[in-house]
Amino acid sequence: MKMTFRWFGTNQDPISLEYIRQIPGMTGVVTSLLTYPVGEAWPMDQIQAMKDEISAHNLEVEVIESVNIHEDIKLGAPSRDEKIENYITTMERLAKIGIKCICYNMMPVLDWARSHLYYNLPDGSNTMRYEADFINSVSVEELAARYAKEADTYEMPGWEPERMKTIRQTLEKYKDMKEDTFYANMKYFLDAIIPHAEKLDIKMAVHPDDPPQPIFGLPKLIISRDNIRRYLDINPSPNNGITLCTGSLGARKESDIPSMIREFGKEGRIHFAHVRNLRFENETDFYESAHFTPYGSLDMYAIMKAFHDINFKGWVRPDHGRMIWDETIKKGRPGYGLYDRALGATYLQGLWEAMTRVKQES
Ligand SMILES: [Mn+2]
């Protein structure tokens, strides 16, 4: 595995590349042009500037998270062809700076949702939380307003005030969409882009839906082993793969993540992994815990063992952590503090080293 760290970009992330470089084992960052409008081709000069800045700090950039998919593509609207053309142009430009993997999601309208961004834990840290009753009782506008208030210095990706202005109309468009139609729209997109991905040597890695259940009446598709199987089968190219996100998949109690890693990983269809833990409070509610197995509900040893057993060579990043130490006061992007993710990265590498040594010495 290659250990990486998510970085939101210049002026978008309070954590410097210099600090990221100091985390043991960190080979590179995973980033995006966050402020660029979805559906348009990213300008080459901005892509190059991003690459130059990261290289100047002795870090690699091989993974982009994310190049977002325009709603027209998900909805199968007539204007999708133009958006797909732009997507391919972005892929071509990213290939020029050595990008090898693009993470994206196929979630209708909203990228993710939580009830709390800074939920206080008994140890004095705070973290993101998902309380199902709360999410089911608020309107999408009320939730957006809550995020804007709680994280006042950062726009939450997918929850930008600009997007919220037309959210009703966008939600309405999905009202009667059948699952088969949604898969057909995904296939149309994949069949258009995957030949280019093959030529450019870029691995496409769809991220599972977060949370993995319908909210605000929106369909959720990439949430389970069977749905991922279907997504991979609609375009069987090895360049059509997944981002295995333990936190997103793990928010369904029935998910067997190690078995998914073995199944999809052995086929070479896992290109990128988000590894984090979460703690269930009851059947539906959870908060994002420290990575260490005893603190959460996911067995991080079993997860890393599955990656180790399949000899995973792709990119891994620690995922959402808690805000700890001085970050609880200064805060920052929820889930994306420096310290807990750095601890997560070293913990995951500790597990990995032990497994490698046991294998060598046996
Ligand atoms: Mn994730």
Image (cartoon, rainbow, N blue to C red):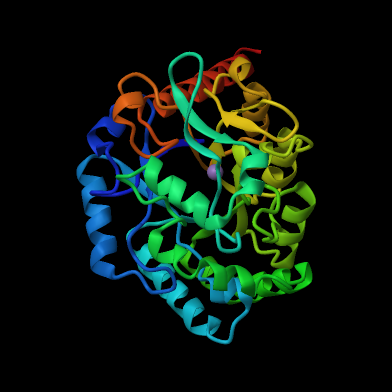
- Does residue 242 appear in this view? yes
- Does residue 211 appear in this view? no
- Is 13 on the left-hand or right-hand side of 297? left
Q: Position of residue 206 (x, y in %)?
A: 59, 56
- Is 216 on the left-hand or right-hand side of 84? right
Image quadrant of residue 176? Answer: bottom right
Q: Is residue 180 above or below residue 342?
A: below
Q: Is 133 in front, or is 98?
A: 133
Q: Is 321 in front, or is 346?
A: 321
* Residue occupying image coordinates x 67% and y 25%: 281
Q: Position of residue 15 (x, y in %)?
A: 28, 36
* Residue occupying image coordinates x 72% and y 74%: 184
Q: Position of residue 66 (x, y in %)?
A: 45, 56
Image quadrant of residue 329? Answer: top left
- Is 94 on the left-hand or right-hand side of 70? left
- Location of the C terminus by quadrant is top right
* Residue occupying image coordinates x 69% and y 60%: 217
Figure quarter occupied by ligand 1:
top right
- Residue extending furthest bottom? 78
Q: Position of residue 265 (x, y in %)?
A: 67, 44
For the image shown, how many numbered marks are present on the structure?
0
Q: Is residue 87 above or below residue 28?
A: below
- Is 102 on the left-hand or right-hand side of 58? right
